[in-house]
Image (cartoon, helix red, strand yellow):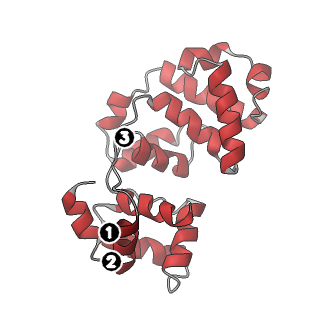
Amino acid sequence: MPTDAYTFLKKDPVMAKLIEVNEPIELSPHPDPFARLITSVVNQQLSVASARSIRNRLFEQFEITPIGILNATEDDLRSTGLSAQKVDYMFNIASAFKEGLSTTKLHSMSDQDVIETLTKIRGVGVWTAKMFLIFVLARNDVFPIEDLGIRKAMDELYPSLTTQSEMVKHAETWSPYRSYASRYLWTAID
């Protein structure tokens, strides 16, 4: 994490404590954006253990590329534990990448444009797009209020913030380092 981000976030006493008790957090672009987007779909609405099990089977049995996914059958993908709906979403993502969606294009876009572009793909919602911004494009200033873990951490650490809008407003004080703050919030519930 850049030194200025540490200094900036430590102005918040709760965030300062999280920074003190955790390892430094870095945001680095992910080397395989397609695989990371597929992983986000697998992880949607599942426990960590269930998602890991399905993801491991998927990655062991299939080539996680647009062509690899498009060449697989629905039944074969479902055999890993994926629902029919998630298989459909994976086909949609694979088609979008095959038709020209690229990390280069996404890197050149604003955060809002990335969210709008990705959410046009059936099966990719705002949560998934924000995870992509943080974990693939390594954007510094994303606050995923849609994430249950973020809301849970905010509830525990900032009990006076009782609504999502209050949480978002407080998170604005962390700008331009809300992605780092979010990563620290997740450490509070791990």
The reply to whether dot 2 and dot 1 touch (C-beta < 8 Å) is yes
The residue that appears at 69% across and 28% down in the rendered structure is 57
> Around disc 2, counting alpha carbons within 10 Å, would you say few (fewer than 14), some (14 to 19), or many (20 or more)?
few
Q: Which mark is residue 93?
A: none
Q: Earlier in the sequence, mark 2 or mark 3?
A: 2
- Closer to us: 109 or 22: 22
Location of residue 26 with respect to 123 vertically, above or below: below
If the image is split into quadrants, where does the N terminus sit? Answer: bottom left
If the image is split into quadrants, where does the C terminus sit? Answer: bottom right
- Residue hosting label 1: 174
- Residue hosting label 3: 137
Instruction: Give the alpha-carbon distance from disc 2 to disc 1, as whole Å.
Output: 8 Å
Secondary structure state at the residue bearing disc 1: helix
- Closer to us: 117 or 35: 35
- Residue hosting label 2: 12
Q: Earlier in the sequence, mark 3 or mark 1?
A: 3
**Can residue 158 be seen by looking at this rendering?**
yes
The residue that appears at 51% across and 35% down in the rendered structure is 36
Residue type, label 1: Trp
Q: Earlier in the sequence, mark 2 or mark 1?
A: 2
Give x and y (percent) for residue 163: 55, 78
The residue that appears at 43% across and 21% down in the rendered structure is 100
Secondary structure state at the residue bearing disc 3: loop
Location of residue 123 with respect to 24 vertically, above or below: above
Secondary structure state at the residue bearing disc 2: loop
Instruction: Give the alpha-carbon distance from disc 3 to disc 1, as whole Å.
Output: 19 Å
**Can residue 123 be seen by looking at this rendering?**
no
Residue type, label 2: Asp
Q: Quadrant of residue 67?
A: top right
Residue type, label 3: Leu
